[in-house]
Amino acid sequence: MSDKIDFQLLSFGMKRIGWIRFWVQAILGVVVTAVLLFSNVVNNNSEGQLSLTPGLSLTTFSLILLLFSLWQGWLIVRTGRAIASNARPSRGETSRLIKRGILIDLLGILFALIGYQALMGALFIQASSQTTGQLITAASDIPITGLEILSVLSNTQVMAAHFIGLCFSLWILRRIYR
């Protein structure tokens, strides 16, 4: 009797956490996609401005990993439904699914962190070359634009999405082995 209650609680927890994980990552993924598309459409590279392309490329790769993580989130919900039925997956199959999601989220965080370093390095060099306190600026002084800051924000959003997926996956993995 207690096994049936434990399976029902695990099923409910996996479905609930899986859906929360899925929707939070989906919303953040839409924000990141919109910002990356906007930054590609409004690309205003001025003369002397450093390129953010390496950082944005790594952010895009992390976004692709986020799409795979979304698919893993949907599989977690489906597995949670299967646990409540008679044809439930084994603990090993379920833990492999969760561990695969953890690996994807860790790789996504890794690429987002490297992309963040590339973005912030370029913006730091650009900011340090600006002169402050002068009314007349030299031709080499190119201000940091809002679009560049928005690009950093998109990288932060994809990193947050992977972190949320990682936290939820670790919680579910702990519940499986309890």
Image (cartoon, helix red, strand yellow):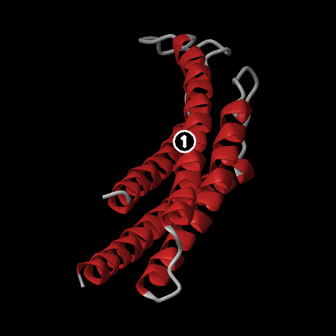
Q: Residue at x 29, y 77 (%)?
A: 9
Side of 63 relative to 109 (left or right)? right
List the residue tagged with mark 1. Answer: 106
User: In the depicted view, which residue is nearer to us: 105 or 127?
Assistant: 105
Examine the rendering and report whether any part of residue 147 can be seen. Answer: no
Image vertical order of residue 146 relative to residue 128, above or below: below
Q: Residues within 10 Å of mark 1 (few under 14, many from 20)?
A: some
Q: Quadrant of residue 125?
A: top right
Please identify the quadrant where the N terminus is shown: bottom left
Image vertical order of residue 37 relative to residue 10, above or below: above
Residue extending farthest to the front is: 1
User: In the depicted view, which residue is nearer to us: 137 or 18?
Assistant: 18
Side of 135 relative to 107 (left or right)? left
Image vertical order of residue 73 relative to residue 3, above or below: above
Q: Residue at x 28, y 75 (%)?
A: 6
Q: Residue at x 70, y 45 (%)?
A: 61
> What residue type is disc 1 on?
Leu
Q: Residue at x 64, y 42 (%)?
A: 59
Side of 63 relative to 57 (left or right)? left
Picture coordinates of residue 149 (x, y %)? 52, 38
Residue extending farthest to the bottom is: 86
